[in-house]
Image (spheres, helix red, strand yellow):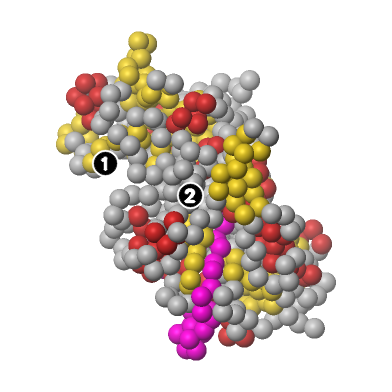
Amino acid sequence: MSKVISFEQAAKFIKDGDIVTVSSSSGLGCPDRMLQAIGERFERDGSPLGITTLHPIAAGDMYGIKGIDHIAREGLLARVIAGSYPSGPSSMPMPEVWKLISDNRIPAYNVPSGILFDIHREAAAHRPGVLTTVGLDTFADPARQGCAMNGLAEAEPIVHKREFEGVEYLYFPAIVPNVAIIRATSSDQKGNLSYEHEGAYLGGLEQALSVRNNGGIVIAQVKRVVRNGSLRPYQVHVPNNLVDYVVVDPDQMQTTQTPYDPAICGMIARPDDSFETPEFSPEKIIARRVSQELKAGQAVNLGFGISANVPRILLEEGLGGEVTWVVEQGPVGGVPLLGFEFGCAANADSILPSPQQFTYFQGGGFDQSFLSFLEIDRAGNVNVSKLGKKPYLTAGCGGFVDITAHARKIVFSGFFTAGAKYRLENARIEVVAEGRFQKLVEDVEHVTFSGSMGVKRGQEVLYVTERCVMQLTPEGLEVIEVAPGIDLERDVLAQAAFPLRVSAQLKTMDAALFSPQPFGLELEAKA
């Protein structure tokens, strides 16, 4: 008997007060058409009412065009818990979900993605919850915001401090979903799901297990239905015994802006010269300097932002393939993609389910991580998850907290100030007009990475900017390199809101970084 039903029929299975877990990332894997059907049913019938939604990695499209905005309606959405949220430039309208959050109309929480996947596994196994050191002394800690994004959330805490055998942990009680909305490429009539066109598996299997084991229903959105028996067992990522209903969207996009690219799902491999390399700019200089921290043979996590260009720096230097890149959505190896395709990789060696990738990250199995920063403070704390009166300009933490908790080495990258103008000539960089906003502030607004925990754990932490390189020390931030053409006192020390230490062995950054041609990167072998 076929499990295929219409979107309208599937939307009727969502009941008032349901806890619905949705498998999606920012630009890929979102079951948009199913979310749209739920929103349309609410507009038409006034139901369902008061649902809670869980989004372990992200709540869909990063600019709020799709994803959770389909259901971000007062009355329909009562509470949301997500790893990250839609974001975009100030020129774009505020996403609907952010209107609900900012106006304090629904409680909203930003929970680190890996922890959210752990919560699903605990719910599936009927265990009480997650006990973890990930997130200590960050905004996830109850001593700070406890993951709360507004006043309503602060009044309903979802995380607590617990001591176990003399060690302090964060305790997240299990949240039991009773509906899962997941996505795949193909389903047979029995409901076996394969992911052959997807850029990542994300966490559909864990989400289906958490719902199935607690008596709920699992709805899978797919691009096509195939004949029973036509999917080989090794192709099936979510088996039919975990799937109740299948809905079909033949126009399902591979990513928000990609109908289908066979390199994303490993059907073909792209030649190295097909990848665009960044134009010469201050951003490229930062990415180049970050690349100098690499060693051949390392496994390196990569985050969104300036550092996402580092793989292309290696291609330009003839060193593609010397490093294995690992991204939270699951790709291992290949060339991580940019923009709405971030989270996918072309030419990947493997694609892991996101929950397993996060286990790898939380345990610090990789060599180092390249991430971005919005703000840094005197303690070395980093904020990437909240920005002033326009929080929708940032997406939240995603996997940032999981990744940085036990990483051996972290390289943060970003501009020293916001909005400065530069002159790049003669292998030098000069500040023509200073930025309007300081990024090295007395205290960051949101602690996404804790400098004090980094020192306590013995992590190696660097902060790379277009003007200088700094390192985290027990005494605070220390400038260890300055760019050619930059005045240390005027352009660096005077532009920070707190005193910076200066190394007695202060160096000048490699002048070759500041010229347009390839700079001759060489990678030592990993020890």
Residue sitting at x 78%, y 76%? 190
- Left or right of 231? Residue 252 is left
Percent of width and height locating residue 48: 53, 81
Q: Residues within 10 Å of mark 2 (few under 14, many from 20)?
A: many
Residue sitting at x 32%, y 31%? 466
Image quarter where the C terminus lies is: top right
The residue stretch that appears in magenta:
37-66
Image quarter where the N terminus lies is: bottom right
Instruction: Identify which amino acid the numbered label 1 is placed on.
Output: Ala
Asked if residue 397 can be seen in this view, the reply is no
Q: Is residue 240 above or below residue 402?
A: below
Percent of width and height locating residue 444: 35, 40
- Left or right of 512? Residue 31 is right
Res. 481 image quadrant? top left
Res. 306 image quadrant? top left
Asked if residue 150 can be seen in this view, the reply is yes
Residue sitting at x 62%, y 60%? 175
* Circle 1 SS class: strand
**Cα–Cα span, label 2 and label 1:** 28 Å
Q: Is residue 65 magenta?
A: yes
Q: Which residue is mark 2?
A: 146
Q: Which label is found at residue 418?
A: 1
Res. 518 image quadrant? top left
